[in-house]
Amino acid sequence: MAVDSESKLASAPVVGKPQQSNQGFKVNGVRSVNTKSSIDTPVVSGGYSEIDGIADKFRRHLVIPIISKSTGASSWTALVPGSIITESGISVDTINDSISEKQDWRAGDVVTDTVTVRAVIGPRGLLLSSQQPDKLQKNTSVHLDESGSSANVSLVVQSDGTLEVHKTCSHDGIDENGRPWLERQNRFLETSIAVQETDIFVKPLRFTAEGETFSIDFPYLASQTLAQLAMAGMGGSLLLDTTSELLGEMAQNVWPKTATEAPRDFIEKAHFDRIDRRVAIARAAVPELGAIIDSSEIVLNGRTLLGFHSVMEQLRSHPAIDTISPTLIGEIHGDLNLHNILCCVGPSAKRPVALIDPRGVHLLSDFAKTRDFEPGDYAYELSKLKFSLSAFSEIRHGFLELQGQGTDFKISFKHHSGSETMRQADAGFFDALSTNAEFMKWIEMVEPAGFGALRKRVLLGEAANFVADAACALGRDTVHEVIPLFLIGLDKLNSVLAILNDTISEHKLDDWFARSGEQDTATGILAVQQSLLRGRAAAPLWDVLEIAVPSEQVAAMQGLLETLRGKCFPLHTNIYTSSTPNSKLEFPCLVIHGLQKAHGPTDAILSGVTHANAFFEASGVSDSVKSALRIISVQATGDGSGSFGRQGSKLLAPGPWGASPLELVLLTAQQLRFAKGGRWILDGTSFFVLSRKLEPLTSDVCVLTCPLTAEDISNPAQMAMREALAKCRVQAKPTQSSPEKPSIMPSGAVFLSTEVTTALTQSAKQGTQARGDVLTDIILAAKLDKGSWIRLYGAMGWAGDVDAAWSAAQKLVSVVAAEAELVSGGDKVAMYSFGSLEEYKSLVERAKSDPDMNSLAFLAATLAWREQWAIGE
């Protein structure tokens, strides 16, 4: 369920959450059973609080873990309206210190003069407000988007912290996809044996019927939808593991309930009659669809298709329909698309997934005039999943493009972060089912014609879903989807006919999703996913992620990293401070360096390297292992941040759910790759998303570049850097743009091999104190004359004695024999900065709408969910 809008009034009575039953969810042969024993409780990400489970619904709020300055321990987690920090000027430290001073907080308590506790969520979560206690609303609601639901759906936060989902509808909707749908849904949830005996479905608290309005209230489960995780790029294998295990459980505990013999004309009524009914509705609303429906042939993406009337006539009369018809019908969810599967996470989660929004619209005309739920074919569940994997979810996210008119059309889909995930899952759907033992036991019982007959019935249902959904688009106010949905359905109906005729096995739409050849940042997101979601048995892509901070910020950094454990790095990853050697040191790991005041970024980096070397040596790491370590180094040495940072650090500033500067830097750092031991050095006030896969590094010194932006052109420092790069003629790879062209800029990432850092630290031990950054002090100082370098030094704003700085830079240059190499991050690299209040405000405001930041947030959520339930391990 995604956020649509925030903080509008809503009302609902206060009740407690009902207890769900203790049926488990079997993952890789291990069943998770809900009991109160702490031994059986699933491991939850470090620092995960109840309020984390609603933060993704409040994307205009900032998540502030409350950290003790002395111990670094996290007590409360506060959800704070962003404007309190970015507009009102109340500092993060003020809120942190005020909350940490008290053990107990209640709704209405005052945090500062202008900040009040609206609600206490769970044992340690605070929802804050800028309203005074006497003006607090009784509750807060957030509108939720349930994949185009005809109902108004909102998350209601009561003042006592109770969380409920409120669904209400006052109109009939398209094909009764309104109040009648909601009434039938409630009837199913009230009377279904499967709902009563399992915890697969989210069970209602109550329903209300008043006049034309029907409402249902549900307990809120901390979760994201499987569609959100899939579209972020969770990986096809993990997606298929999840869906096939769910279907295996439903084959045991849902579909057999109240199963009865299926009518011989089930396919005729459930698919063909429904298609005709929905097409008539869509045609009446979209007149131009009529000509397409009545055409004898349609050309779609160069393929000539039988017209709608002809293909429907041949399908209706096809003799194979009888052989693939279901033998049984019974209890089914009925709308099992990815948007209706919740991935549950957090301390209160009882199972990995739960189902919402069961079907309420009739399939069979026998049930059209009743409010009872109707039994259905379990294959309809599979066809809904296949439908959402093959194109529906991407249509709902706006990735479809339609061209053409008359009878000749072309459909294509924009490449996005989840493209590879969706294509892999769609292609592997039937194979994953055929290897699920529980599911195949069910098939053996109910499919006399075998798995092949089921496969054909699922593909027919998938095609019917696309055609039928053309009418549903009217209810979602997305009329532009009507024609493409119909065309995709027509294409698939033609394919089903060919399959029944044994002409083809299955027509895939892969070429519709083919990349245009242009670069995009989905490449960078995929690189993050490949590192972040690797299995424990797979070799990691980095060994150490080190962060250098002023010594007084070590406790805060350690506390914040603990809250990100299992989100931005695997749950089992250890966090060390370099001041405390550990004889049981394990890689990969995070290491925090507490530095004294440094003269500049280069000085801080070399100081951090010295700290790291001492830490590894004292922890018993051999020289050979140490020299091969692949280290990502983040520098956050503190330069004053005003109200938005924490303890003066911009990197420690809070952000919306999944989008704090620290989270984003940790996640995007995992795009970097190594061909040898060394360090990728990142600055602590920016991050980037690459648009091309990084080539293997061939040099001991590399500078990652990105395209010049309009902001760079107006920035004197950036223009000075561009001119310096052009003047230096730094070596570029043959496949990269020439560094002489004014189109590239340094991204803020520099690679130094172990050999280079060793030589540099030896120079630093002899008293060399550089005052600039690595790019100016080590790379450009080797190429520029003194006058040019001094002009660059001044333009970059470095302080101190410039002659001493030049002298120090030359001493460092003298020990580095390697030529620097430019490595392109791509032509469409997305750069983000948070070095100033304006940049930070822009980052906060973009978090909700920026596709890359959304993907990163949901990848972190995927890791938290996978780690909690050990899925795929």
Image (cartoon, rainbow, N blue to C red):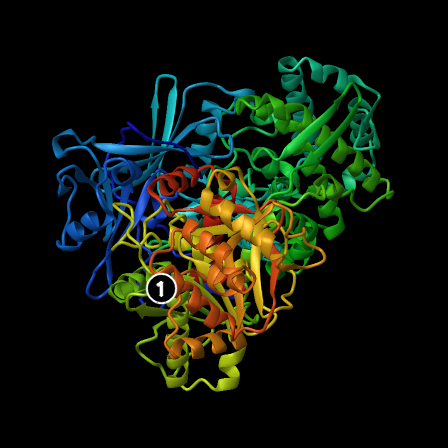
Q: Pick the quarter of the image with the N terminus.
A: top left
Residue lying at 46% horizontally and 41% vertically, measured from the top left = 715
**Left or right, 754 with reference to 463:** left
In the figure, is residue 237 to the left or right of 5?
Answer: right
Left or right: 454 with respect to 302? left
Could you tell me which residue is drawn at 41 percent across and 67 percent down?
Answer: 605
- Residue 789 position within the rendered picture, expressed as x and y whole percent measured from the top left: 48, 57
Residue 162 higher or lower than 540, as above or below: above
In the picture, residue 564 is in which quadrant? Answer: bottom left
Q: Which residue occupies 38% across, 59% down?
A: 802
> What residue type is disc 1 on?
Thr
Residue 603, visible in the rendered structure: yes
In x, y percent, where is residue 284? 64, 13
Q: Quadrant of residue 32?
A: bottom left
Residue 176 placement (x, y as % from top left): 52, 22
Foreground pick, 162 / 358: 162
